[in-house]
Amino acid sequence: MKRFPLWAGSLLMLCSTPTLAKTVLTEKNLNTYLQIMQERDALDDSSYEPDEPATELTFATHCDWQRHYQDAVATAPANDVAEVEAIAKRHGFAPVDYYEFTHKLQWMSLEEMQMVLKSSEAMLNTLPADSRAELEIEIINQNKIIALLQRCMTQEDKQAAQRLKPVMMKKIMQMIDNS
């Protein structure tokens, strides 16, 4: 599976569900998200450099996903934004909805993410300086996403996430079996 920089994943998040839904966390959007991820994995992403340094994400304190999306797009390479938006639109998603969906999808694994972050933080001192700096940025970014989700997930989002979690796990297992 190809590894994409965190900002690329964040951009992918910018393109999901129809804006009429009360929550973007629907099974239809999950299916579309998984199709988009398969398409992204199949692409030869020549713009991704494995040694590309991690950059720290910033999220304003508001819960306006359109503004979060605009902020993310403003700092991302234009050709990458265009590629992600084209794929999302091809699948019927507005980029901002996909961005919101991708972030909110992480709510399902929030507890696991926090445990992994704690163990990663514990091993920081054992790493060489270069690796430590990269991991520190990744930990900071994940903590910022967690804070954003804790602030911006509505009760409806949380309930939808709980309903979607077993569906998502089943679909991911099917994808793994089929690969």
Image: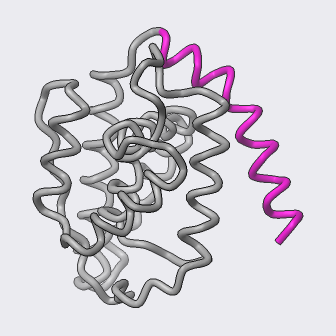
Start-end of magenta stretch? 156-179
Q: Which picture quadrant has residue 67?
A: top left
Quarter of the figure with the C terminus: bottom right
Which part of the image, by quadrant, shows the N terminus? bottom right
Q: Which residue corresponds to the image point at 82% horizontal and 53% vertical from the top-left?
A: 173
Above or below residue 60? Residue 23 is: above
Residue 88: percent from left, percent from top: 45, 53
Instruction: Name the outermost residue toward the right.
Output: 177
Decide which of 105, 43 is in the foreground and name it. 43
* Direction from residue 72 to residue 138 in the image, left or right: right
177 sits to left or right of 128:
right
Q: Name the foreground residue: 95 vs 168.
A: 95
Q: Position of residue 127 (x, y in %)?
A: 35, 79
Above-or-below relation of 21 to 123: above
- Give above or below for 131 relative to 61: below
Please tell me whether residue 174 belongs to the stretch shown in magenta: yes
Q: Residue at x 54, y 50 (%)?
A: 91
